[in-house]
Image (tube, rainbow, N blue to C red):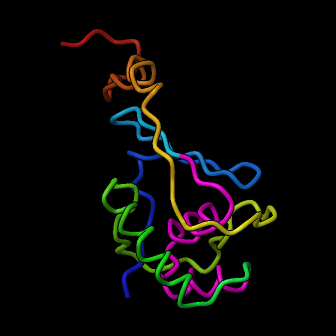
Amino acid sequence: MTRYRANTPRFVDETVDGEALIMDMVTGSYYTCLDSSTMAWEALKNGRALDEVSALLSSAYPISVEEAQRDVEQFVSDLLHEEMLVARDDALDASEPTLGNGTSPGTYQTLRFERYMDLADLILLDPVHDVSDAGWPHEPA
């Protein structure tokens, strides 16, 4: 049974009020998930198996486990395509949260994320991206 984690440090994320904001520190793209998609993202990045995420969604929303399973499988495929998730190779820490910040689950919509490129140039201009082990500011050799 494959479990996943967020592809860190390339991707950083934060969930606030049921919305997940996920930033790609390599390309400068950022992604958002809402409601049910946030719940699935949080569970998947914390190592929950696909069947666990499907059961979680089915218990939180008025959908069948089968419908949730189809959505979760497609969502994971999309997340893997964007390289936002990677296979987890360590044991699952039982102390990790399933749902992040415990906000209301909102409404159920087919699991998806939105990708934005409008700030990519600004994000990639940030000198923090050019920091080496020597720190910043430090002139390159």
Using residue 78 as the reference point, say whether residue 39 is left or right of it.
right
Q: In the image, which residues are magenta? A: 32-59
Front one among 80 and 91: 80
Residue at 43% x, 47% y is 11
Q: Is residue 92 above or below residue 37?
A: below
Residue 130 painted magenta: no
Q: Is residue 70 above or below residue 38?
A: below
Front one among 59 and 137: 59
Q: Is residue 69 above or below residue 18?
A: below
Farthest-out residue, top: 139
Q: Position of residue 18 (x, y in %)?
A: 72, 55
Q: Position of residue 128 (x, y in %)?
A: 42, 23
Q: Quadrant of residue 4?
A: bottom left
Look at the magenta stretch and give its main secondary structure.
helix
Residue at 74% x, 65% y is 107
Front one among 51 and 88: 51
Q: Quadrant of residue 6?
A: bottom left
Residue at 72% x, 86% y is 59
Farthest-out residue, right: 104
Residue at 56% x, 68% y is 110
Image quadrant in which the C terminus is located: top left
Q: Position of residue 74 (x, y in %)?
A: 41, 72
Image quadrant in which the N terminus is located: bottom left
Q: Position of residue 53 (x, y in %)?
A: 56, 80
Residue 47 painted magenta: yes
